[in-house]
Image: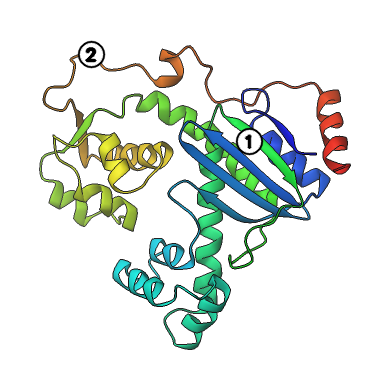
Amino acid sequence: MALKGNLQDFSTTQLLNLVHLARKSGALRVNQDSQTAELFFQDGKIIFASLTGLDGLLTDMLARAGKLSPGQAKAIQARAKEQDDKRLALILIQNGYVSKEDVVQSATQHILDVVYRLFTWTFGEFFFEPDKQPDKNRLTVPIDLGNVIMEGSRRVQEWERLQDELPDLDMALKFTDHPDAKLRNISLSAEEWKVISYVKPTNSIRRIAQANNMSDFQIRRIVYGMLQAGLVELIRPPGAPAEARQPESRATGAQPIRAPTVKRGIVDKLIARIKSM
């Protein structure tokens, strides 16, 4: 029997804790608006994850990690339509395209990217289906949930702070005076350079995030760092309303991202129910 509910009653942190403590195998699917995330577990460890727009294809994971160029990934995927990801990984390693470590790191990072995004979801229906596993052609990597839960909880706190610092993603960015001089003294990541390339008064922060397939958390973190470094400043795009829009969590009357308070007895009952599945 599947377990189902709503994130307004049980947070991602609490759900992962239940699976972790019960050492369960199965799939947790969460739907929020037009997005669906699906996490797969084996004996209490997360082994695979997918999200709308991030389906977990090997070539896509390697491209996002910078191990393959987008052109290489597209060409390899087109030629390897009949190959599953496990077999394709062996072929790429044997032919020197990537190393075994590249494959494992890319798959691990993909899983973490999906699950950390899920920590910022404050609403949505969830379904846990026991013993369901990912397709056999998918590449799986076991990751201990204990560290994932700790890091995810830390990110929730950071997310709340970033929402306060950058409540309106419809604002745009422009470079401050002499940005070249400042860039020479700052080491930027690949994601930060991608954001830098889209900085102009007509591009809202939200549009920059969409162009780079970044979550609200990722773009807020990057933009906040750039603001603190004095590289950019916030401006209102041409034609935008004069008054800044309220953060969505406050404008809709929803509470900030915090774990719902649940009595210990209820948690114990849920753990017992998951164990019995």
220 relative to 82, above or below: above
Which residue is at 59% across, 38% downward?
A: 30
Amino acid on which disc 1 is placed: Thr
Which residue is at 73% across, 44% downward?
A: 129
First in residue order: circle 1 vs circle 2: 1
Quadrant holding the C terminus: top right
Where on the picture, by quarter, is residue 234?
Answer: top left
Residue 36 drawn at (x, y percent): 52, 41
Is 67 on the left-hand or right-hand side of 123?
left
Residue 217 drawn at (x, y percent): 43, 38
Is 169 on the left-hand or right-hand side of 152?
left
Residue denoted by label 2: 243
Residue denoted by label 1: 12
Give the class, few, some or many, for how many residues have Cα within 10 Å of label 1's Cα (few <14, many ≥20): many
Which residue is at 75% across, 44% downward?
A: 19
Amino acid on which disc 2 is placed: Glu
Front-most of 59 and 187? Answer: 59
Residue 183 drawn at (x, y percent): 20, 52
Q: Identify the element where label 1 is drawn.
A: helix
Where on the picture, by quarter, is residue 209?
Answer: top left
Which residue is at 59% across, 44% downward?
A: 151
Name the front one of labels 1 and 2.
1
Where on the picture, by quarter, is residue 215?
Answer: top left
